[in-house]
Amino acid sequence: MATILVVDDEPRIRDLITEHLQHAGFSCVQAGDGTGALAALGQGGVDLVILDIMMPFMDGMTCLREMRARKITTPVIMLTARSEEYDKLAGLEGGADDYVVKPFSPRELVARVKAVLARTMPAPDDSGSVFRFGDLTVDTASHSVKVAGQEVPLTPKEFDLLVFLISNKGIALSREKILQKVWNYDYYGEDRTVDTHIKMLRGHLGPCRQYIVTVWGIGYKFDPETL
Protein backbone atom coordinates (compact mmCIF):
# COMPACT_ATOMS: atom_id res chain seq x y z
CA MET A 1 0.00 0.00 0.00
CA ALA A 2 1.47 3.34 -1.08
CA THR A 3 1.49 6.24 1.36
CA ILE A 4 0.47 9.69 0.10
CA LEU A 5 1.36 12.94 1.87
CA VAL A 6 -1.44 15.48 1.36
CA VAL A 7 -0.26 19.07 1.88
CA ASP A 8 -2.80 21.91 1.89
CA ASP A 9 -3.54 24.72 4.33
CA GLU A 10 -7.30 24.07 4.09
CA PRO A 11 -8.37 21.12 6.30
CA ARG A 12 -11.50 20.65 4.19
CA ILE A 13 -9.42 20.10 1.06
CA ARG A 14 -7.00 17.78 2.87
CA ASP A 15 -9.85 15.68 4.23
CA LEU A 16 -11.60 15.51 0.85
CA ILE A 17 -8.45 14.29 -0.89
CA THR A 18 -7.65 11.88 1.92
CA GLU A 19 -11.15 10.39 1.84
CA HIS A 20 -10.94 9.62 -1.89
CA LEU A 21 -7.38 8.28 -1.69
CA GLN A 22 -8.22 5.99 1.21
CA HIS A 23 -11.27 4.76 -0.67
CA ALA A 24 -8.90 3.91 -3.54
CA GLY A 25 -6.72 1.87 -1.17
CA PHE A 26 -3.98 4.34 -0.27
CA SER A 27 -2.63 5.28 3.14
CA CYS A 28 -2.50 9.03 3.83
CA VAL A 29 -0.72 11.49 6.09
CA GLN A 30 -1.39 15.22 6.16
CA ALA A 31 0.46 18.51 6.57
CA GLY A 32 -0.83 22.09 6.60
CA ASP A 33 2.16 23.82 5.01
CA GLY A 34 5.57 23.24 3.49
CA THR A 35 7.35 23.12 6.84
CA GLY A 36 5.06 20.34 8.04
CA ALA A 37 5.54 18.52 4.74
CA LEU A 38 9.33 18.53 5.07
CA ALA A 39 9.03 17.23 8.63
CA ALA A 40 6.78 14.38 7.46
CA LEU A 41 9.14 13.53 4.60
CA GLY A 42 12.04 13.46 7.05
CA GLN A 43 10.37 10.54 8.82
CA GLY A 44 10.38 8.49 5.61
CA GLY A 45 7.79 6.14 4.21
CA VAL A 46 6.11 8.61 1.83
CA ASP A 47 5.68 7.41 -1.76
CA LEU A 48 4.09 10.54 -3.29
CA VAL A 49 3.29 14.11 -2.27
CA ILE A 50 0.20 16.10 -3.26
CA LEU A 51 1.40 19.66 -2.70
CA ASP A 52 -0.67 22.85 -2.81
CA ILE A 53 1.15 25.91 -4.15
CA MET A 54 -0.64 28.68 -2.25
CA MET A 55 0.02 28.15 1.48
CA PRO A 56 1.16 30.38 4.37
CA PHE A 57 4.50 30.07 6.20
CA MET A 58 6.11 27.95 3.47
CA ASP A 59 4.35 27.75 0.11
CA GLY A 60 4.39 24.76 -2.20
CA MET A 61 7.01 26.04 -4.63
CA THR A 62 9.43 26.82 -1.79
CA CYS A 63 8.78 23.39 -0.29
CA LEU A 64 9.38 21.70 -3.65
CA ARG A 65 12.67 23.53 -4.17
CA GLU A 66 13.78 22.60 -0.66
CA MET A 67 12.86 18.96 -1.27
CA ARG A 68 14.98 18.76 -4.38
CA ALA A 69 17.82 20.69 -2.72
CA ARG A 70 17.82 18.03 0.02
CA LYS A 71 17.91 15.30 -2.66
CA ILE A 72 14.40 14.15 -1.75
CA THR A 73 13.21 12.66 -5.05
CA THR A 74 9.72 11.61 -3.90
CA PRO A 75 7.31 12.30 -6.79
CA VAL A 76 5.14 15.41 -6.43
CA ILE A 77 1.77 16.40 -7.88
CA MET A 78 1.20 20.15 -7.53
CA LEU A 79 -2.21 21.65 -6.77
CA THR A 80 -2.73 25.17 -8.04
CA ALA A 81 -5.66 27.55 -8.35
CA ARG A 82 -3.78 29.34 -11.10
CA SER A 83 -3.84 28.08 -14.66
CA GLU A 84 -1.24 30.36 -16.23
CA GLU A 85 1.44 28.57 -18.24
CA TYR A 86 4.17 30.22 -16.14
CA ASP A 87 2.95 28.57 -12.94
CA LYS A 88 2.75 25.15 -14.58
CA LEU A 89 6.21 25.42 -16.08
CA ALA A 90 7.66 26.75 -12.82
CA GLY A 91 6.38 23.67 -11.03
CA LEU A 92 7.70 21.28 -13.66
CA GLU A 93 11.06 23.02 -13.82
CA GLY A 94 11.22 22.85 -10.03
CA GLY A 95 10.93 19.07 -10.12
CA ALA A 96 7.18 18.37 -9.98
CA ASP A 97 5.90 15.29 -11.80
CA ASP A 98 2.40 16.53 -12.59
CA TYR A 99 -0.03 19.28 -11.67
CA VAL A 100 -3.78 19.58 -11.17
CA VAL A 101 -5.62 22.90 -11.38
CA LYS A 102 -8.27 23.78 -8.77
CA PRO A 103 -11.17 23.21 -8.76
CA PHE A 104 -10.41 19.60 -9.57
CA SER A 105 -12.25 16.31 -9.73
CA PRO A 106 -11.15 14.03 -6.86
CA ARG A 107 -11.48 11.07 -9.23
CA GLU A 108 -9.12 12.72 -11.70
CA LEU A 109 -6.63 13.40 -8.92
CA VAL A 110 -6.75 9.75 -7.80
CA ALA A 111 -6.20 8.67 -11.42
CA ARG A 112 -3.16 10.94 -11.70
CA VAL A 113 -1.78 9.59 -8.41
CA LYS A 114 -2.08 6.04 -9.75
CA ALA A 115 -0.43 7.03 -13.04
CA VAL A 116 2.54 8.71 -11.35
CA LEU A 117 3.03 5.81 -8.92
CA ALA A 118 2.85 3.32 -11.80
CA ARG A 119 5.76 5.14 -13.43
CA THR A 120 7.86 5.69 -10.32
CA MET A 121 7.35 2.60 -8.15
CA PRO A 122 9.04 -0.55 -9.53
CA ALA A 123 6.99 -3.73 -9.57
CA PRO A 124 7.84 -6.13 -6.70
CA ASP A 125 9.16 -8.76 -9.12
CA ASP A 126 11.08 -6.28 -11.28
CA SER A 127 14.64 -7.52 -11.60
CA GLY A 128 15.60 -4.41 -13.52
CA SER A 129 18.35 -3.86 -16.04
CA VAL A 130 21.61 -1.97 -16.10
CA PHE A 131 22.47 0.17 -19.13
CA ARG A 132 26.03 1.37 -19.69
CA PHE A 133 27.06 3.89 -22.33
CA GLY A 134 30.57 5.26 -21.86
CA ASP A 135 30.59 7.12 -18.54
CA LEU A 136 26.81 6.78 -18.13
CA THR A 137 25.31 3.94 -16.07
CA VAL A 138 21.55 3.59 -15.54
CA ASP A 139 20.20 0.95 -13.15
CA THR A 140 16.44 0.55 -13.50
CA ALA A 141 16.18 -1.79 -10.50
CA SER A 142 17.64 0.72 -8.03
CA HIS A 143 16.45 3.78 -10.00
CA SER A 144 20.00 5.13 -9.94
CA VAL A 145 22.08 7.01 -12.50
CA LYS A 146 25.84 7.48 -12.41
CA VAL A 147 28.10 9.62 -14.57
CA ALA A 148 31.80 8.75 -14.38
CA GLY A 149 31.09 6.78 -11.21
CA GLN A 150 29.32 9.65 -9.44
CA GLU A 151 25.64 9.23 -8.61
CA VAL A 152 23.38 11.81 -10.24
CA PRO A 153 20.14 12.69 -8.41
CA LEU A 154 17.20 12.73 -10.82
CA THR A 155 13.54 13.33 -10.11
CA PRO A 156 11.28 10.36 -10.93
CA LYS A 157 10.08 12.14 -14.06
CA GLU A 158 13.62 12.82 -15.27
CA PHE A 159 14.52 9.18 -14.65
CA ASP A 160 11.47 7.95 -16.58
CA LEU A 161 12.34 10.25 -19.46
CA LEU A 162 15.94 9.03 -19.59
CA VAL A 163 14.93 5.35 -19.48
CA PHE A 164 12.34 5.89 -22.23
CA LEU A 165 14.94 7.53 -24.45
CA ILE A 166 17.46 4.75 -23.75
CA SER A 167 14.84 2.06 -24.43
CA ASN A 168 14.36 3.60 -27.87
CA LYS A 169 18.08 4.13 -28.56
CA GLY A 170 18.71 5.58 -32.00
CA ILE A 171 15.03 6.24 -32.70
CA ALA A 172 13.82 9.81 -33.30
CA LEU A 173 10.92 10.36 -30.90
CA SER A 174 8.40 13.15 -31.37
CA ARG A 175 7.49 15.37 -28.44
CA GLU A 176 3.94 14.04 -28.70
CA LYS A 177 5.16 10.44 -28.39
CA ILE A 178 7.31 11.35 -25.38
CA LEU A 179 4.37 13.11 -23.71
CA GLN A 180 2.15 10.11 -24.37
CA LYS A 181 4.55 7.50 -23.00
CA VAL A 182 6.31 9.35 -20.17
CA TRP A 183 3.49 11.61 -18.99
CA ASN A 184 0.73 9.08 -19.69
CA TYR A 185 -1.66 9.15 -22.64
CA ASP A 186 -4.23 11.41 -20.94
CA TYR A 187 -1.69 14.03 -19.86
CA TYR A 188 -2.60 17.39 -21.37
CA GLY A 189 0.86 18.83 -21.73
CA GLU A 190 2.69 20.95 -24.25
CA ASP A 191 5.88 20.68 -26.26
CA ARG A 192 7.59 23.00 -23.78
CA THR A 193 7.04 20.44 -21.03
CA VAL A 194 9.27 17.97 -22.89
CA ASP A 195 11.81 20.64 -23.83
CA THR A 196 12.04 21.82 -20.22
CA HIS A 197 12.69 18.32 -18.89
CA ILE A 198 15.21 17.55 -21.63
CA LYS A 199 17.09 20.71 -20.66
CA MET A 200 17.12 19.73 -16.98
CA LEU A 201 18.15 16.15 -17.79
CA ARG A 202 21.03 17.30 -19.97
CA GLY A 203 22.17 19.56 -17.15
CA HIS A 204 22.35 16.57 -14.79
CA LEU A 205 24.22 14.36 -17.26
CA GLY A 206 27.18 16.72 -17.63
CA PRO A 207 29.72 15.25 -20.09
CA CYS A 208 27.11 12.74 -21.26
CA ARG A 209 24.55 15.42 -22.12
CA GLN A 210 25.30 15.03 -25.83
CA TYR A 211 23.87 11.51 -25.77
CA ILE A 212 20.46 13.23 -25.96
CA VAL A 213 20.30 14.57 -29.50
CA THR A 214 17.83 17.15 -30.80
CA VAL A 215 16.22 15.97 -34.04
CA TRP A 216 15.07 19.19 -35.65
CA GLY A 217 11.44 19.22 -36.69
CA ILE A 218 10.71 15.99 -34.81
CA GLY A 219 11.91 15.82 -31.22
CA TYR A 220 14.76 13.93 -29.57
CA LYS A 221 16.68 10.66 -29.64
CA PHE A 222 19.24 8.91 -27.46
CA ASP A 223 22.44 8.34 -29.42
CA PRO A 224 25.53 7.37 -27.37
CA GLU A 225 27.65 7.36 -30.53
CA THR A 226 27.67 11.16 -30.62
CA LEU A 227 30.62 11.44 -28.21
Image (tube, rainbow, N blue to C red):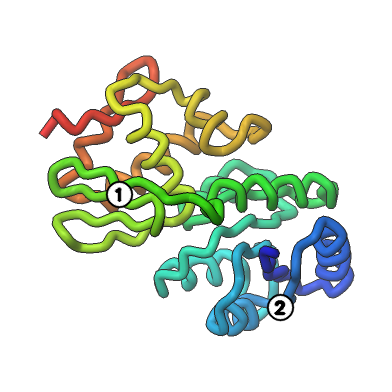
What percent of the width, then of the height, locates residue 89? 53, 46
Q: Which residue is mark 1?
A: 138
Secondary structure state at the residue bearing disc 1? strand
Quick one: 124 or 71, which is closer to the camera?
A: 124
What percent of the width, then of the height, locates residue 53? 65, 63
Q: Which residue is mark 2?
A: 31
- Disc sitting over residue 186 in the figure: none
Q: Can the viewer see residue 91?
A: no
Q: Can the viewer see residue 162?
A: yes
User: Which quarter of the figure is the N terminus placed in?
Assistant: bottom right
What percent of the width, then of the height, locates residue 140? 39, 50
What kind of residue is marked 2?
Ala
Q: Residue at x 60, y 48 (%)?
A: 118
User: Which quarter of the figure is the C terminus placed in?
Assistant: top left
**Snapshot quadrant of residue 188:** top right
Secondary structure state at the residue bearing disc 2? strand
**Snapshot quadrant of residue 9:** bottom right
What kind of residue is marked 1?
Val
Q: Residue at x 37, y 42 (%)?
A: 162
Q: Given contact means CB atoms under 8 Å apart, are the residues at marks 2 and 1 in contact?
A: no
Q: Residue at x 75, y 46 (%)?
A: 111
What percent of the width, then of the height, locates residue 198? 37, 40
On screen, 123 above or below 17?
Answer: above
Q: For the residue carrying disc 1, how many other residues have a C-alpha within 10 Å: few (<14), some (14-19), or many (20+)?
A: many
In primary-sequence order, the first of circles 2 and 1 is 2
On screen, 62 above or below 87?
Answer: below
Q: For the residue carrying disc 2, how many other residues have a C-alpha within 10 Å: few (<14), some (14-19), or many (20+)?
A: many
Quick one: 217 or 112, which is closer to the camera?
A: 112
Q: Residue at x 68, y 62 (%)?
A: 50
Query: From mark 2 to mark 1, how far is it between C-alphas?
Result: 34 Å
